[in-house]
Amino acid sequence: MTEPARQTFPVKVLLGRLEQGATAPWSSYLPDHLRPKGVSAKVFETSGSASSSKAKAEAKPQKKEYSPVGITVLGRVWEYSQDAAGCREVQHAIDVADEETQLRIAAELQDHVWDAASCPHANHVLQKCILALHPRHSQFILDVLMRQRLASQAARHKYACRIVQRLIERCPLEQTIGLLRCLIADVLPISCHAYGNYVIQHILQHSSLQGELCAALEEHLANLSSDVYGAAVVSCAMTTATQASRLSLAKAIMQEPSVLIRLACSRHGHAAAREVLQVVEGPDRTLALRILQHNQNRLQRSRYGRIVAGIH
């Protein structure tokens, strides 16, 4: 017969307290051989329990979506636009109004363009105006951005970048060319910005100035390939630009082998490296493959580099 295991001093003290009837709140968590008589063991629900998950879901209060009630907004457009519920009322008013009323609503924002563009609520109203009105009626927004030299700042603003994107989508080139040229002139800091990179990608996807933009990107490939957002812009250019622009950009990438390797090892840049191999032909493709072969060790250490290294 085996002897019972010796009890350490702390265990003896604990057992002594429990035997004296001191039932602590945590006693139900004790193992069976230590739990006092009459105390039930604590039952834990598994995280995968369907009933538990359902109960938690039912207990969690559901966020109600605001439904516009159709109040009159004329005369108070700017006031309502700055509020979470009010901006929805203004957007609803634009949706259901005739063109004349839409223009009257937009007119009340003409003295508040930058404040509206940079507001978490009013920016939605400004976007709605751009989408609902004829492009010529959005000129007052472009005028403010250009006159106050806010183009680059707007492109990198959390909310105002959306206004720039809507203008690029909606307005013709002859109307936005000044804005686009300002953005292209400042392409590096905008491309390497958390919000600005989406504006540059928007130009690549929606503007006929993408060739001019790609030429500007070629001048900054070393910096772009070293930045997570910049690499995403290069990938966008390599997948959406014209064949001629893609080929020119691919050859520029190959001129500096470290650029190609950095892109290949990047989460957002490896698509660009793959496109380089798809675009170039003949001796240029042979050179690209040789660069990758000479950097196999680095490529194999990267999840994305291994993808590019597998292309032949």
Image: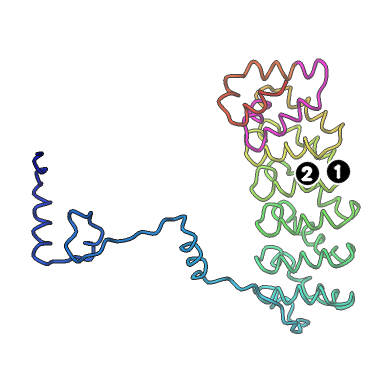
User: For the residue marked with disc 1, what is the amino acid?
Assistant: Leu
> Disc 1 marks which residue?
209
**Part of the protein shown in magenta:** 260-286
User: For the residue marked with disc 2, what is the amino acid?
Assistant: Ile
**x%, y% of residue 308?**
67, 27
Towards the viewer: 188 or 34: 34
Query: As displayed, is residue 206 above or below residue 213?
Result: below
Q: Splitting the image into 4 quarters, where does residue 283 fall?
A: top right
Among all residues in the image, which is located at the extreme front?
Answer: 1
* Mark toward the start of the polypeptide (1 vs 2): 2
Q: Magenta residues: mostly which secondary structure?
A: helix
Q: Are marks 1 and 2 in contact (CB under 8 Å)?
A: yes
Q: Secondary structure at mark 1?
A: loop
* Quadrant of the frame with the C terminus: top right
From the viewer's perspective, is the residue at label 1 or at label 2 nearer? 1
Towards the viewer: 8 or 242: 8
Q: Secondary structure at mark 2?
A: helix
**x%, y% of residue 271?**
71, 34
- In this rendering, would 18 be left or right of 282? left
- In this rendering, would 160 be left or right of 171? left
Query: As displayed, is residue 271 above or below residue 144?
Result: above
Q: Splitting the image into 4 quarters, where does residue 284 fall?
A: top right
> Disc 2 marks which residue?
184
Query: As displayed, is residue 147 above or below residue 237?
Result: below
Q: Residue at x 71, y 65 (%)?
A: 123
Among all residues in the image, which is located at the extreme bottom?
Answer: 72
Q: Residue at x 19, y 59 (%)?
A: 35
**x%, y% of residue 158?**
65, 57
Q: Residue at x 67, y 39 (%)?
A: 230
